[in-house]
Image (cartoon, rainbow, N blue to C red):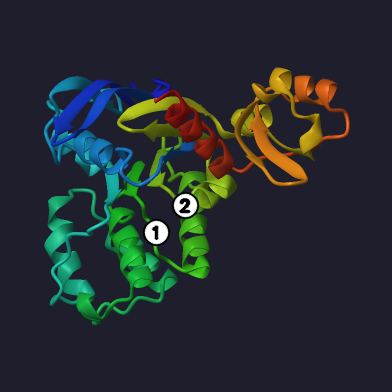
Amino acid sequence: WHDMKNILEVSGLNKSYGNFALQDVTFSLPEGCITGFIGVNGAGKTTTLRTLLGLTGKESGDIRIFGMDMSGHERQIKESIGIVLDDGGFYEELTLAEMKNAIAPAYSTWCEADFREYMDRFSLNPRQTINTLSKGMRAKYALALALSHKARLLIMDEPTSGLDPLVRSQILTVLTDFMAQSRPGEEHLPRGVFFSTHITSDLDKIADMLVMIDDGRILFQEEKDTLLERWRIVKGDRAKLDMGNRELFFGLEETAYGFTGITQQPNRVLTAMPDAILERPSIEDIMLAHIHTRQAKA
């Protein structure tokens, strides 16, 4: 199966509780990619990840990881997945070494040397207790555990949220290193990172592919570069806006003098307003444009 091009495939995933529902969630992770899963808080990112991992039941849908069905091969699949969830699930009073000793036996692929290497790299002391860790150290510890059993797919829920920029950049470096390394004899085995976040600036740097969820539905899945290429932020003179060209923009903001908008039709904009200034957007700009559009239709 290793010539399969998708490391994860989700189709027709439905799950509802309370007044929230995942609706027909369908997307795939191409191998060899860092895929960002984006959306505002409450859009359905955590629910989707928990459902993928079998931590919460689904009403319908099909989940395949490494080409295998999650429901039939859960144990085998979980050996090859590194998971970093928001809560961590650690026992506060244990030391880092004790917690590791509780987790390691669950994996036949556990590698103590890898674990020690990450602990050193992150300057973590195995004798420290978990309740003394800062949020950043906790995140690094969770990542050290996730990467110490030869995982090939890393699934992370908001791993950088609430962390300072230095820690965030260290974590991003570890992710790009993880994607770049391949162990002797495993060069043919696909790797991937699936990274949910509402801090999209982290993904501006490292993501290859983006999947956006909003209100329980997938809005798009696209290569980051293609997406950023297609959208432009436009700044111009408010007097140049008229009924004909307003529809070229999403989320127009107007001041007494100028306007700012985002468009997928930069050439038409330039034809209509040759002196407008066009800038490359960030992922956040594009995410917000999609949400504005949905709210406008609602």
Q: Residue 4 has which mark?
A: none
Residue 236 higher or lower than 99, as above or below: above
What residue is pinned by disc 1?
161
Q: Quadrant of residue 51?
A: top left
The residue that disc 2 covers is 199
Q: What element carries label 2?
A: loop
Name the residue located 19 percent from the left edge and 66 percent from the top edge: 100
Image position of 155 (left or right of 168) = left
How far across and how far down the image is residue 120, in percent? 40, 73
| Tag 1 near tag 2, CB within 8 Å | yes
Inspect this view and state whether residue 288 appears: yes
Q: Nearer the viewer, residue 219 or 244?
A: 244
Residue type at mark 2 is Ile
- Give the vertical position of 192 relative to 242 (above or below): below
Q: What residue is rendered at 18% in x and 50% in y?
A: 107
71 over 110 or under it: above or below = above
